[in-house]
Amino acid sequence: MERQTGHLSRDIREVVNNITWMKVIAIGNANVGKTCLIKHFCESKFSQCYHATVGVDYGFKVQNVNGIPYRVHLWDLSGDEQYYDVRTELYNGTDACFLVYDVTNPSSFESLDNWLKEIAKHGAMGAKVVVVGNKADLRSNRGSIATTEGRKWATSRKLLYYETSALTGDGVSTMFTELLDSISEKKPRH
Ligand code: GDP
Ligand code: MG
């Protein structure tokens, strides 16, 4: 088929327009591994793009959820205070949110409640929220947050808890698959 650069054929446009979108955001302190988790998910299968920009990273992937293709948009809202205004804008229309801390960094764990408050403040409480303890590959007995502690925190707030390593990939696809499944169950399709 002949195609001009920059022009999508009508057929392709129709397919793209008929795919339901999902908006997923990652929040949590800087350096906990949000960008790496999104990259791992985006790059392990299918075609996708990932752009690092100032204040926000964005990636997308077409993913089959329960046999239906969804265009999943993933945003890493920078934890940096100076990007507060950008983050506020980006909470709009969020379907799901994964709240990440680094299991080797207690202060990132202690910040989780503030992140929950921020979600509530920006009206994204309708979004499905899960808690993710990342960098599980680096956990040591000294100074790390134990799985039981992370799970207890999440359960006490009625949230699901996952542990991941964006380095080894452990737990990453389970977390994304279960999160996207739960959104698809309640998201109306067009
Ligand atoms: P963000 O600021 O939350 O987006 O964090 P990044 O994704 O940029 O990761 C911060 C640093 O942690 C980088 O140097 C990553 O290579 C490293 N990192 C992220 N996830 C993991 C992980 O699961 N295990 C290990 N060992 N390092 C990780
Ligand atoms: Mg990042």
Image (cartoon, helix red, strand yellow):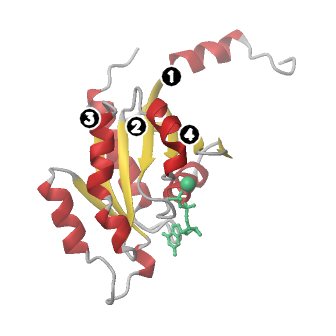
- Is 137 above or below relative to 190? below
Compared to residue 110, the image places residue 14 above or below, namely above
Residue depth check, mark 2 versus mark 4: number of the one nearer the observer: 4
Q: Is residue 43 left or right of residue 74?
A: right
40 with respect to 183 (left or right): right
Of labels 4 and 3, earlier in sequence is 4
Residue 65 numbered tag: 2
What residue lies at 35% left-to-right and 52% top-to-bottom?
99
Q: Is residue 45 left or right of residue 126?
A: right
Let me know if residue 141 appears in the view. Answer: yes
Say which of marks 2 and 3 sits in front. 3
Residue carrying label 3: 125
Q: Report the Cα–Cα distance between label 1 and label 4.
A: 12 Å
Q: Position of residue 137 (x, y in %)?
A: 44, 78
Q: Secondary structure at mark 4?
A: strand
Residue 138 in the figure: left or right of residue 7:
left
Judged from the image, the secondary structure of the residue bearing numbered disc 2 is strand
What residue did someone put label 4 on?
Answer: 61
- Looking at the image, do the residues carrying marks 2 and 3 touch, with CB atoms under 8 Å apart? no
Residue in the picture at 32% in, 60% down: 111
Discs 1/3, front? 3
The amino acid beneath tag 2 is: Val
Residue flagged by tag 4: what amino acid is it? Answer: Lys
Q: Earlier in the sequence, mark 2 or mark 1?
A: 1
